[in-house]
Amino acid sequence: MAVSMNNPPQVLLIEDNPLDVRLLRERCKEDPNWNIRFEVAASLAEGARAMAANRHDAILLDLGLPESDGLETLERMLKLHAEHAPDSAIIVLTSVTSDATGEEAIAMGAQDYLVKGAIDAGQIKRAIRYACERQRMISERRQAHERLTLMATALDQASDTVIITNRDGEICYVNQAFTKITGYSAEEALGQSPAMLSSGKQSPAFYHRMWSAITAGKQWEAEMIDRRKNGEYYPCHLEIAPVSDDQGNITHFVGIQRDLTEHKLLENQLLQSQKMEAIGTLTGGIAHDFNNMLAGITGNLFLARRKIDDRDKLKQRLDAIEGLCDRATTIIKQLMAFGRNDMVQMAPLTLNGLVRDVHKMMTSLLPESIRLPLEICDQPLTVVGDTTQLHQVLLNLFNNARDAVADNPNDAEIRCTLAPYTPDDGYLKLHPEAANQRFARIMVRDNGCGVEADTLQHLTEPFYTTKEVGAGTGLGLSMVVGAVDQHHGILTLDGAPGEGMRVTIDLPLIGDQGAVAGDIHEQDFIPGNGETILIADDEAAVRDMLTSTLSFMGYRVISANNGARALALFRQHRADIRLVLLDVVMPEMGGPESYRRMREIFFDLPVIFASGYERTGIPSELLAAPYQRCLRKPFSPTHLSELLHTMLT
């Protein structure tokens, strides 16, 4: 505490001799410009009560009291001082003229000492002033230490990870939650870079944007995928803020990371719940399409049998059957994408084919009374995104638009467009983060009833719905918002009563490179060189088809009807087999268990797991190496030949 000589200092005098009390008061009156207020206590017990009741700038303590004497008095006083008045300065009064006692008292914790009988007003004034100043500095250091201790305790109690690095990105502090979430101890983390948590799921451009922001003194936040010490991936939200000194120079960075594992699980559960709502709509349209395709296949097979001697006519019928099968395969892939519940996997993809596929699917699902014009530019528009999420986004928008035009059955229209977009000045004022970027713009527009302005601002809130009770969850647009944010895109909603609704999604373009395989025309198959391949599938038709196809491609084939038989054949022909192609689910022994036992014989054995359910039932450790792949049924012979060529060369 600071003592101003303009304000009378409050002093507690602990002295049992009334004469000494009177002499001190008189000495203090010798300076007419200085007032001092005394509160007197005749014992340590009275002094303790006074300290507890009132605040004092300083305590004058006589070392010779009835209940104790000498430095023992100070020792007892220091305990009371710490409990009741830690910010008050202690000045001891001693009748001993030797400096030894006073210096020892200072060493124990007193701020100064005065010798009775040799005191004047100036000495008391100086002693109180200097003692209070020294005590103020001690109190400030103690309070600062207490604050630091409190902060450290609070950070260690936090459920989110806290990481502090220096200017160069070396970790200098982590809290207990860091160890709990990542599995790394503080000792393992200190001195390391946060890159120790890198999963490889973020691009170099992602980290470049992060460092550009924080080194410029800006806060930065994003969702990302990190990796624990045990190799497990986990989703998280990371926020980083720079820490600057008094001159404004950045000295440290503090990052707060929240584990989103539970949040994503709940989000996925809600997403799956929403998907189930659409199953009824999907079923009718898909059954309609499949019945048409089956009818076409049956009819063409009937005609093909009658054209066996006419090769051109036979080829025409077989081409028609192949086209119908490709259509069926496309619908199955769309269904698998719709029902998939994997973690988001961002990769370059071309939107042209994705939008076209979803539009084709909705053409089958929505009533024929709704017009569905589609406008897609010829230029390939490639973004970094997750196919499943974007598929779900478009499905949500089409479903919302379908509900919006339900009251306009005679003139209902849902228009979908895809085109490149370069932001103008007006757009950049609203979205400055879009500067120096080009976008792929997806727009879904309906001519329904539209919405009021006050309703429009709530449409993206979770569980907010304009539909009747039981007709919707209110999750559709809120999930669209989350998906667009994950793609670093911009969502815009425009609508007014009687003017319908327009939903615009702008996704950053990365150029024409990196298009997905679905946009690449298949070439002729790549022949083999007589390599031996072991296949296992419990479906005889599939097994026979694979045997014939691989033999035609130039491979030698050994086949089995289950995993146990495949294992026995592998042991028998170990020296010849170059690769195994295994169905995942088979009686007696499935593909993963069969392969695990084969690896006990040949650890680096190349494998392709064939599954109708993507990676369901395949442990992640069996797909970790480049020579371990998963192929989803149905697959084309061309795709299979390309994969075999890649893995065997």
Image: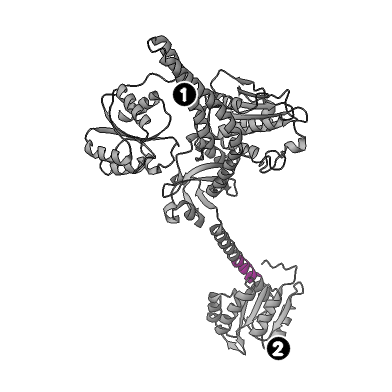
Instruction: Identify the amino acid type marked 1.
Output: Cys
* Residue 58, placed above or below residue 472: below
Q: Position of residue 53 (x, y in %)?
A: 71, 77
Which SS class for mark 1?
Answer: helix
Q: Which mark is residue 113?
A: none
Q: Position of residue 306 (x, y in %)?
A: 42, 13
Q: Is residue 516 left or right of residue 4?
A: left
In the foreground, 92 or 389: 389
State the residue at coordinates (38%, 24%): 637
Instruction: Identify the amino acid type marked 2.
Output: Pro
- To which residue does mark 2 refer? 18
Specify whether residue 440 is in view.
no
State the residue at coordinates (77%, 35%): 453
Real-space CA distance between mark 2 and mark 1, rounded to the nearest whole angstrom: 112 Å
Which SS class for mark 2?
Answer: helix
- To which residue does mark 1 refer? 325
State the residue at coordinates (52%, 33%): 335
In the foreground, 271 or 196: 271
Number of marks present in the image shown: 2
* Residue 489, placed above or below residue 553: below
Quadrant in the picture for residue 271? top right
In the foreground, 534 or 605: 534
Q: Main secondary structure of the magenta part?
A: helix
Q: Position of residue 610 (x, y in %)?
A: 39, 34
Query: Which residue range is magenta in the image?
Result: 129-139
Quadrant in the picture for residue 28? bottom right
